Amino acid sequence: MKDKISKIKEEAMEEIKDLNNMEDLEELRIKFLGKKGELTKVLRGMGKLSNKERPVIGQMANEVRQDIEKEINNTKESLKKEIQKKKLEKERIDISIPGKNIVLGHRHPLVKTIEELENIFMNMGFSVVYGPEVETVENNFDELNSPENHPSRDLTDTFYITEDILLRTHTSPVQIRVMKENKPPLRIVSAGRTFRFDDVDDTHSPMFHQLEGLVVDENVTMANLKETIDTFIKELFGEDMHTRFRPHYFPFTEPSAEVDVSCFNCKGKGCEECNGTGWSMELLGCGMVNPKVLQNCGIDPDKYSGFAFGLGIDRIAMVKYGIDNIRLLFENDMRFLEQF
Ligand code: PHE
């Protein structure tokens, strides 16, 4: 019997060595130490032993059971450690790997242009205000003295939302809002989106941007308008730039003018780009606020006068940044935008 028991011990110890997972270890425990296990089987035969032998064998069997249990537990412990170690190795954070760059965006060339324009006018004492892109026909046309039959009112030129509501065709309705809500003296600029039913080409887009300016006070004259525009153009494009006022018609200003500035390319000498004229055409529209418009807004035209101007921002951005196609400003192509 002694031999059997020591053989069981040897076998168990030998098998444990080869095991490397928890399930197999448990199976082995049942095989040797369980109720129907090898050791138990041997012990069942104890009845046949003499009184003298029984305690000796009993003690030996107990020692063997303890030894096997101890070996199993030890192996379990080291297995656990092994598993933990592998897990840690797998999950280890490599702090030497370079971090991912945070991609910071930057301002769109149009936004930069708008900010530059606003800054120039703020330095000249203007306030910056905003108006809605969805406007009333009243603010966009009626109060601006636009004739009932003016072509710009046509469905083919303007995006109507209802009969009385539209996408503003210019920033001039901001003039109406400012004059109705405030008393002179007024000195504001307002930049934003405007909409016209235009086909897209290199220089036209159904959505474009304007900056509106309005000054209303006592004794405001055409001289103030000219000086303001001239100063602005020199601030924006440089001291060597000049302006030229050509008579024009706008229903909301009287008299009205269109302003040309020195050719951006040749600064006035005459080149291919300006067809030898030295002038870059139609940069902005302006004029003295029509007394009828002042009246529409509850401002006394006998006491107050004013001037207004509106300029295309997209064109200025294109000249400033050397962009030859207006579509590039709105397509959001990163290859283009990353250049600014
Ligand atoms: N609103 C005019 C346009 O879109 C420009 C303008 C503004 C003209 C203010 C005169 C005064 O063409």
Image (cartoon, helix red, strand yellow):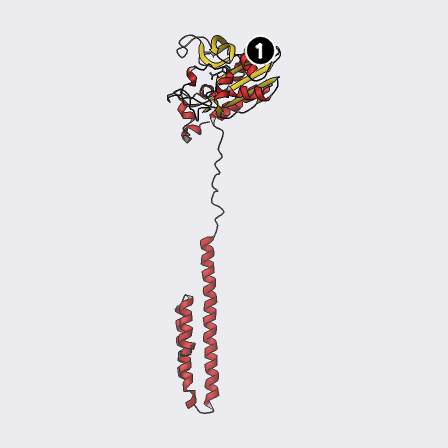
Rendering quarter of residue 16:
bottom left
**Type of the residue with mark 1:** Asn
Q: Quadrant of the N terminus?
A: bottom left
Residue 289 visible at all: no
* Left or right of residue 17, residue 240 in this image: right
**84 vs 127: above or below:** below
Name the residue that disc number 1 marks.
224
Q: Is mark 1 within 8 Å of ligand 1?
A: no
What is the number of callouts on the image? 1
Residue 248 visible at all: yes
**332 vs 146: above or below:** below
Looking at the rendered structure, the secondary structure element under dot 1 is helix
Most foreground residue, 90 or 199:
199
* Left or right of residue 328, residue 143 in this image: right
The image shows residue 86 at horizontal and vertical percentages of 45, 58
Q: Residue at x 51, y 20 (%)?
A: 173
**136 vs 49: above or below:** above
The image shows residue 43 at horizontal and vertical percentages of 42, 84
The image shows residue 127 at horizontal and vertical percentages of 58, 21
Q: Residue at x 48, y 87 (%)?
A: 55
Callout 1 environment at 10 Å: few (<14), some (14 to 19), or many (20+)? Answer: some
The image shows residue 62 at horizontal and vertical percentages of 47, 81
Most foreground residue, 40 or 77:
40
Most foreground residue, 193 or 51:
193
